[in-house]
Amino acid sequence: MTEKALRLGTRRSKLAMAQSGQVADAVSQVTGRPVELVEITTYGDTSREHLAQIGGTGVFVAALREALLRGDVDFAVHSLKDLPTAQHEGLVLAATPVREDPRDVIVARDARKLTDLPSGARIGTGAPRRMAQLNAYARTHGLEIETVPIRGNVDTRIGYVHSGELDAVVLAAAGLNRVGRIDEVTDFLSVDTVLPAPGQGALAIECTADNAALIAALAELDDPFTRAAVTAERSLLAALEAGCSAPVGALADLPPLSAPLERGDPQADGQTVKEMRLRGVVGTTDGSTLVQLSTTGPVPQTHEAALALGRELATEMLAQGAAGLMGERAQ
C-alpha cells in the first residue's frame, strides 16, 4: 500500500512552484513518500503596492504558516530572504538546503552590462537595498542612472526590458536559475558592488515543531555551511531591527583566497575552511550615504555562534549611524 502523500505548501508563482518542485523531489527521495504541492495565495502576491509600502516582513509567508498551523499542509517552502527573522511559535526551520548563487544580476537591453548602460538609463527593481547600492555605485563611478520601483514576477519584470519601458532590471541569480532563464542575464553583479539580501539564494523548509518524524527526515536536506551563513546574515538583520524590505544587504561567505566550494561543502584545496567573512551594508535609497562594514571569524559551529557573529557586526554598523539610514524599522 502506497504511503500517504506529504503536502507541501507553496506560493503559486512560477518561481515558487519551480523551487518547491525541486524540494518535493528531494523530500520524496529521503522519505520514500510521494509529495504533492498545495498552492496558497499570500498577501504579498495579491497586493499591488510596493514592498516597502506594505512592509515586506512576512507578506509572502504568513498564509503558508497559517496553513501549516491549521494542518492543511505538512511542510512549506519559502525563499529564506522573505522569512521574518523572529522565530514563529509552533514552527521550526527544519532545513536550509545548499544555497544557490546569492548574487544579483542585470537583464538589460542590447546585452549591456551595468557599466555599459546609456546615460540616464532606467533600472527597475523592487528592493530599496538594490536602489541604495546601485545609486551609490553610480555616484562613485560617474554613471547616470535612474532606479525605478517595480513589482511583479520574473516574466513581468523582464517584460519591462523587452518592451523598452526600462533599460534594465535587477533580479536574483538564484531565481532565474531555478526557472531556467539564467541565460538571459547580461551582467552578474559582484557582491562588492551590490550585497544581496540576507538569505538570498537560500530556501527555508518549515514544518510544525511537534512533527518529530518529519523534522528528522527534512534535516537530511540541511546544509550546515548554508545554515551557518544565513543565520549570521539574518542575525545582523534582526539586530538592526530591520524588516525584509529595509535597505540592508548582508552576505556571509569565505575569505577571498578560498577556492570555490562544491555543493556547499566548506572545503578549499582539500583543507577545511576555518573562517567565515560577514559583510553588511545599509544605505539611503538615493545612494548618498552607505554604512558598509565586514568582519571575519571562525566558521560558526553552533547556532549561537552564528547569531553572535551577526549581532557583533550589527553593533558596529549601528555605531556608525546605520539606524538613521533605514526607512523601515521592524516592530
Image (cartoon, grey):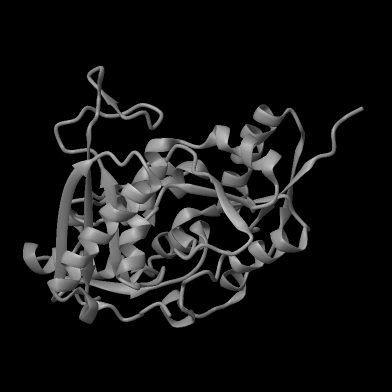
Q: Residue furthest top?
A: 270
Q: Nearer the viewer, residue 153 or 315?
A: 315
To which quarter of the image does residue 294 belong? bottom left
Q: Is residue 261 left or right of residue 321?
A: right
Drawn side of residue 75 relative to residue 322, left or right: right
Residue 229 point in image, percent of width and height: 34, 46
Where is residue 23 shown, x and y percent of the image? 60, 40
218 shown above or below 86: above
Would you identify the image quadrant in which residue 254 lies?
A: top left
Q: Is residue 108 visible?
A: no
Residue at x 45% of width, y 62% of height: 157
Residue 181 visible in the picture? yes
Number of on-image labels: 0
Q: Between 59 and 91, which is closer to the camera in this rendering?
A: 91
* Residue shown at 43% from the left, 80% from the top: 331
Residue 325 drawn at (x, y percent):
22, 78
The residue at 31%/67% (across/down) is 239
The N terminus appears in which quarter of the rendering? top right
Of residues 104 and 271, the one nearer the viewer is 271
Instruction: Report the side of 304 relative to 220 (left or right).
Output: left
Q: Residue at x 42, y 44 (%)?
A: 227
